[in-house]
Amino acid sequence: MSNELFTLEASADLGGPDWLKAFRDSAAKVAAGTPAPSPELEGWRYSRVEEVSTAGHQPVSGAGASGVPSAVSRYLSELGDLAGHVISVDGQIVEIFLSDEVPDGVTVGLAESAESMRVGESEPTDAFAAWNAALSTAPLVISVPRGADIAAPIAVFNHVTQPSSAVFPRLLVTSGENSSVAILEVFSSEDIRSLVVPVTEFSATRASRINHTVVQDLGPQMQQIAFTGAEVEQEATWRSAIAALGGDYARQRVDARLVGRGATGTVAAAYLGSADQMIDLRTFQEHVAQDTTSELYFKGALADRSNSVYTGMARIHSNARGSSADQANRVIKLSEDAWAESVPNLEIHNNDVRCAHASAVGPVDRDQRFYLESRGVPTRAAERLIVDGFFDDALSHFPVPEVVTLVSSRVDELLNREVAHLEGRT
Amino acid sequence: MSELVIEGLHARVSEREILRGLSMTVRSGEVHALMGPNGSGKSTLSHVLMGKPGYEVTGGTVTLDGVDLLELTTPERAAAGLFLAMQYPTEVPGVGVAEVIEEAFVATGRDPSGVPALLASEADALGIEPTLLERSLNVDLSGGEKKRSDTLQMAVLAPRIALLDEIDSGLDVDALRSVSRRVERATSQGFAGSEPLGVLAITHYTRLLEELHPDFVHIFVDGRIVESGGPELADRLEASGYAAWIN
């Protein structure tokens, strides 16, 4: 079997130390042997993966990047206090900064060994993740030693400027026992049509706490196929929050493996679609150990002809008694032409568990709108209040307040886009 | 002096005619009780007057101080001075009462900066816990808290005419009393120097009338008012039930 997404030669052309070349070489062989995803496969149903496969994006080789893009500067000035940041442009790191307040032993930099390139023995989930290992130009590692506590986030910016390119950001975060860290990832681009294939993996060691926030703010023509994975050990907590705002086709898969007793993995998502955009979200919660907890709070709003897909699987393994799994995905359609698929799933192999799932897709609630209008709130303002309020419980799980403000302002922009449509309604 | 004039109002919901020629006038300072059996279409009247989607007016007129309400959208009717306290106030997750009143103030050119203070003082008068003001509208509130919250909103919005739809349902005696006292104060004194409030209270039971002391009682059966009178009409109703008016 083979796929023609990318080539072995593209991987061989990348520079770097010998261990990295060897790692890429072996990863490329795995990737070439992994079938390309198609919408016939369960995990890719409803997706636009074929548009990505046939787009002919060329993997970036690493030349040319220099300076901090203005989009990233803007984020840096708006994001408040950061413990540090990494800026990567077209797959090349252009700046790494760590504040003096970061405890000793915290490392942020390029991977230095094959062992630091992945969590445990984990295999890539699909051909795109496999190609990420083969084509990542500057794999990044953040390592937090035992007991270290970093309150402000470390931000990792990935910005794309080259048209028709494919960029493969790779980040691995390890939190030592009883440590605490917050990671913020921001994906942005110029107004070009390129592909970003990020792979971000977390290893939360015993009793450590990781807060993770993703801001996907790519340009409107961009394609994204992202994978985030977390392995969470005993009494450790991994909390992730995703703001999916941009892209033409933007897919994000999130896997959490709760492998230690009492581990917790939660994911909140706020996503917005407009024009012909598709936001494609897939979650997998694996409850491997007992007394583990997973929670998903997903909220989306879709304008124009945009689409969203959410499919989720919470799987309780036979040894995972005392575990609890909650999944909720709710979507407001701001336009009759918007379309959403929402499929939460549970697979339970132990009786002593608590599981719940909820799913809803519909327009702004008519009774809620009438209630606010009857107080004298004009229709447009009423819809804005309702949609802002709708996102409240998802956004309450976002640890970075500036990101909440960003999402709220984007909600307002979306609603303004719908004004003409709304004012025609009675 | 404000005046809500309803003349020969006909309306239907999904092809079924619910209002069949209803006429009445509510003026500033007057309290009208519209009483009818369950299923007689009383709530339809309140929804039609406020302009809820799904109700079709097929005849008649409704004016407030000469303005044709039926030509206005719901927020415009509210801006014109009409208020509806709903039988079942809708839960609106993530939206607080202050945001709503502030938006309503902005829409009518009033200064929204005083809204929090107004809410706090009215909440105190109505026996509403200050923490309730921080919560989402009607979410996880008891029936009594919802009605107090609606009354609070009315007091701050200061309408000319208030439609109180089964405001007594779900209320305990204490809540019924404090809501009624607030409404009564508005019908005698108005809101902060404005003209007195005119009230159309829609109810099934005579219980509310013992607290609200209506000037006029209307018996509403089969889509129209079949008899109007003073408070004594409520006493007759209490004694005989609606049977006397149903053919």
Image (cartoon, grey):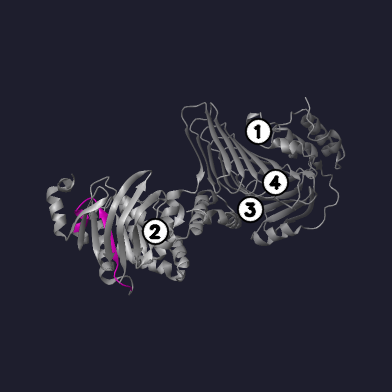
Disc 1 from disc 3: Cα separation: 37 Å
- Secondary structure under badge 4? strand
Disc 1 from disc 4: Cα separation: 33 Å
Vertical relation: A74 (above or below) A7? below
Q: Name the residue under label 2.
A: B70
Q: What stretch is highlighted in magenta?
A: B194-209
Marks 2, 4 in one chain:
no
Q: Name the residue under label 4.
A: A143
Query: Mark 1, mark 3: which one is toward the viewer?
Result: 1
Disc 3 from disc 2: Cα separation: 61 Å
| Residue at x-position 79% and y-position 36% | A134
Q: Name the residue under label 1.
A: A44
| Residue at x-position 46% and y-position 29% | A352
- Secondary structure under badge 3? loop
Q: In this view, does B68 lie to the left or right of B30?
A: right
Vertical relation: A135 (above or below) B57? above
Labels 1 and 4 touching (C-beta < 8 A): no
Three-letter amino acid code at the position of disc 3: Ile
Query: Mark 2, mark 1: which one is toward the viewer?
Result: 2
Total numbered labels:
4
Q: Where is residue A133 in the image (x, y as percent from the top left)?
A: 76, 37
Labels 1 and 3: the sequence-earlier one: 1
Q: Is residue A228 left or right of residue A191?
A: left
Q: Position of residue B222 (x, y in %)?
A: 25, 47
Which mark, by number, is residue A150?
A: 3
Disc 4 from disc 3: Cα separation: 12 Å
Three-letter amino acid code at the position of disc 1: Trp
Three-letter amino acid code at the position of disc 4: Ser
Three-letter amino acid code at the position of disc 2: Leu
Label 3: how many Cα within 10 Å (few below 14, some 14–19, many 20+): many
